Amino acid sequence: MLTRENRFPTAVDRTEMTSMAEKASVELSESECWALLRASSVGRLAVWLEDHPEIFPINYAVDHGTVVFRSSAGTKSLFGNPMRLR
């Protein structure tokens, strides 16, 4: 049974963390990725701004092999328009 103590260990060796991450990593095919994206409509958009990351919650949809989302003007919409990045 999971308890707070065994879910959140107080001290973990870095090599143990790397080993745990490698065991948890699974390479997905492109079709598996699209299937996972279609299975939900809520996610996170992560972008790099100057010297730090920004992460935004978004509602999205998959439409003909494209992930689409709507946003008001601002940081997220800048990254949705490739012409504004140049």
Image: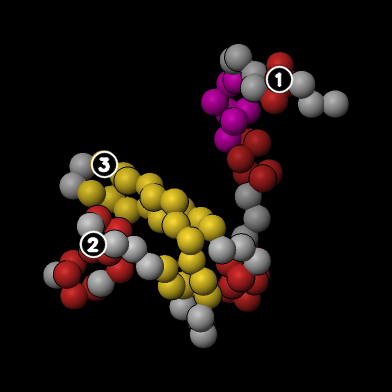
The residue tagged with tag 3: helix, strand or loop? strand
The percent position of residue 51, horizontal first and vertical second, equals 21, 42
Nearer-the-camera pick, 43 or 46 = 43
Numbered label attached to residue 52:
3
- Above or below residue 54? Residue 74 is below
Numbered label attached to residue 27:
none
State the residue at coordinates (63%, 28%): 16
Numbered label attached to residue 73:
2
The answer to whether 47 appears left or right of 83 in the picture is: right
Query: Which residue occupies the extreme front position in the image?
Result: 72
Q: Disc 2 residue type? A: Ala
Residue 31 visible in the current orientation = yes
> Reading the chain from its start, which is encountered first: label 2 or label 3?
3
State the residue at coordinates (59%, 15%): 11
State the residue at coordinates (67%, 45%): 24
State the residue at coordinates (65%, 55%): 26
> Reading the chain from its start, which is encountered first: label 3 or label 1?
1
Tell me the quarter of the picture where residue 27 sits.
bottom right
Query: Which residue occupies the extreme bottom position in the image?
Result: 64
The answer to whether 68 appears left or right of 51 in the picture is: right
The percent position of residue 81, horizontal first and vertical second, equals 25, 72
- Magenta range is 12-18
Tell me the quarter of the picture where residue 40 sits.
bottom right
The residue tagged with tag 1: helix, strand or loop? helix
State the residue position of label 1. 4
Nearer-the-camera pick, 12 or 71 = 71
Badge 3 vs badge 1, beta-carbon distance below 8 Å: no
- Above or below residue 26? Residue 67 is below
